[in-house]
Image (cartoon, rainbow, N blue to C red):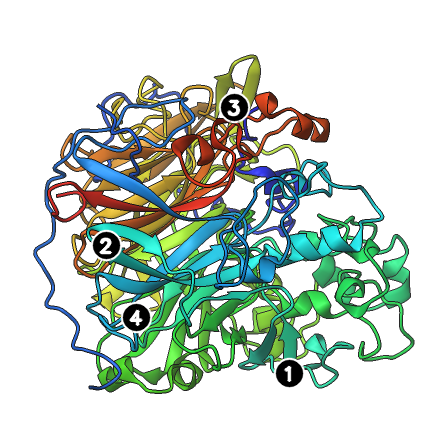
Amino acid sequence: MNKPFEGHTLAAHGDDADLNTSANPSFMTVLDARLSRRSLLRGGVGTAATAVLGSWSLAACGGGDDDDAPAAPAPITALGFTAVPKSLADTVSVPVGYTASIIYALGDPLTATTPAYRNDGTDTDFENRAGDHHDGMEYFGLSADGTRRDVNGSERGLLAINHEATSNLDVRSYYLHANGGTVNPRPTAEADKEIAVHGISVVEVRKTNGQWAYVQTSAFNRRVTPLTPVQIAGPVRGNALVRTLYSTAGTAARGTLNNCGTGQTPWGTDLTGEENWAGYFTRAAGDDAARGDKSVVSLNRYGRAQGSASRHGWETAGAADQYARWNISKTGASTDGTDDYRNELNTFGYIVEIDAYDKTAAIKKRTALGRFAHESASFGLQRAGQPLAVYMGDDSRGEYIYKFVSTANWDAADANSANRIATGDKYLDSGKLYVARFNADGTGTWIELDIANTAIANYATYDFADQADVLVNARLAADAVGATKMDRPEWCAVHPTTGEIYYTLTNNSNRRVEPASGSQHAVDAANPRAYTDTKGAATQSGNVNGHIIRMAETGNTNAATTFSWDVYLFGAEAGSNATQINLSSLTADQDFSSPDGLWFSKNTGICWIQTDDGAYTDVTNCMMLAGVPGRVGDGTVATLNYTRADSTTLSIQTRVGRAPTATTLKRFLVGPVDCELTGCAETPDGKTLFVNIQHPGENLGAVANIANPALYPSHWPGNAGYGAGGATARPRSATLAITKNDGGRVGN
């Protein structure tokens, strides 16, 4: 059974559901759409080179705290490998001339005393093991002796790896338990295990005699879980909206949850985004009346209507506080929420900063960057004396694209700060949060989300109390100012030399030519496709394959309030209609569906694109591509003509980047069955690429199938020789280290 086309299993729990019922027009009020009888546009609409990186090959397919940063090497202008063909095999394929090694998988021990992973459902102590669903990832270099940060360290370093989730058919995480798990009430031991596999790993990796491996005994190794103490930082700190029984002052919280994309700060810390956190909490059926206040509007907008069940039922595992927190119903008598967990949901949904080098440094939730379903956080180019910008997306159908601009101007000396979290305080706790509105003419506007904006202050749907309320309820504030509804904005990445910003828009089953309900979105210039696609006997509708949009700030400055845009690449099957679907003229070596992960190599300039797909998985497993992109505006203006029900024509103009060539866009990696390709990082010398394989074999079909390994959809990486179980192993998420056999830069 393949994944639903919206993405991985989280979609089945409503985490990617359309929660935006605002009247924002998705562009239609500004769109130059016109009725006509003209025929469909003929001719190839090009797209600039895109890329997706992922390559692993068990079988090749066919003094101070820092050293100075290395000089920028020459970017790669033509990809120097043979494209990997599409595949449905339960393996990882990379180009001839490359090797991928599995170095860190679910359950791997992080201390000398933690036993080896048995992978039979009996393992415990996940606070000292690799978590599940490896996702976003950052590399932090170490000196040769392993004692300090070294920005040039390419043979020894730390990986900060997100552990987004854990696979489940109902509330149970079946592969973690010997018998597949127990339904509600959940046994305490099962809940404890499932909670602990979420969060983040910091793990040392080292190359010895040309081979990468993780260092089990490293003093840097640690896990951050949903129970790890963290601080609430920025404008929301101490606000009434985040006061709970755990922190009656509203200054602290526990842990981080459903961590998806990442980012690395210019001062060398890890940023991790909390994405589909809302689904882990439950609310009682009568909670609206019990609350009787505006919090009901907020809860509905963020996906927790009264009566909502939790993803794993952890609230049923016992009376202890660590389980009670997952029930966000109003159960106490207080007026401020300090005697229950009615406000607990407001302590999640942020960008979280962690110093991978320092276990003693505080972990901080950076509330100034807004609260929504965060993916990655990507910094604009740093220029001395100018503010920093952080670009972010909200991954749900019909949600928005955001950026944060710091109050403080960049001081290059802060790149080598001795107190990195204090530097984060300087740049990430004060600034302006903006949301994007895209215009049909290829321009756009950043709208500040500020309580002084009358559209926010006088918003009839929700009564904002102060700026902290605006940040906690950024979605509602963005509704108020009329931001553009997008097709699930996922990862973003900034080109290392041009400074242009790229966003993956994974897909949207609710995009329509003629919306029939408030949950559907009309086609517009930035989200122009709505079509029908077949997968076996099933029919899929909307923006089935997704696209990648890119933006250029006016004046190429971080603080700009206007921008220009085009579509870098439209996902599509190579053989699909060239005037309506395959607008980027993709070939069989380039076609893909549902772009998700997105990352630029600072060393090579390659754009790596990773997929989390369910629409094209009858033809190929998820993949990773490499691309050499052009610039915003390097392509053409295309017109898509749609026939309405009344036989009139709706014409939508969109901007499409220059078409890729065989040397500017290629498939680099195809993963095992049921997986998602996600997470990308590299050594500073560009010679090792780290990539994550998430949830191989996640579609077990039924919990009873856990007793019969022959029914597992995947046995990777055990079938590749890694860890216990061999050819009948339970599948595990894992991290790959990919190198070029001749020792050169990856992709060259």
Cα separation, mark 3 vs mark 2, equals 44 Å
Q: Amino acid at mark 1?
A: Thr
Q: Amino acid at mark 3?
A: Arg
The answer to whether 21 is drawn above or below residue 45 in the figure is below
Residue at image location 38% in from the left, 72% down from the top: 269
At mark 2, the secondary structure is: loop
Quarter of the image holding residue 553? bottom left
At mark 1, the secondary structure is: loop
Cα separation, mark 3 vs mark 1, equals 53 Å
* Of 649 and 185, the residue lying toward us: 185
Image position, residue 13 (x, y; %) = 67, 42
In the drawing, what numbered circle is on residue 601?
Answer: 2
Cα separation, mark 1 vs mark 2, equals 37 Å
Point out the frontmost of discs 4 and 1. Answer: 1
The answer to whether 617 is drawn above or below residue 229 in the figure is above
* Of 21 and 87, the residue lying toward us: 87
> Disc 1 marks which residue?
251
The answer to whether 697 is drawn above or below residue 216 in the figure is above
At mark 4, the secondary structure is: loop
Q: Earlier in the sequence, mark 3 or mark 1?
A: 1
Quarter of the image holding residue 469? bottom right
- Residue at the far top: name it: 537
Q: Earlier in the sequence, mark 4 or mark 3?
A: 4
Cα separation, mark 4 vs mark 3, equals 41 Å
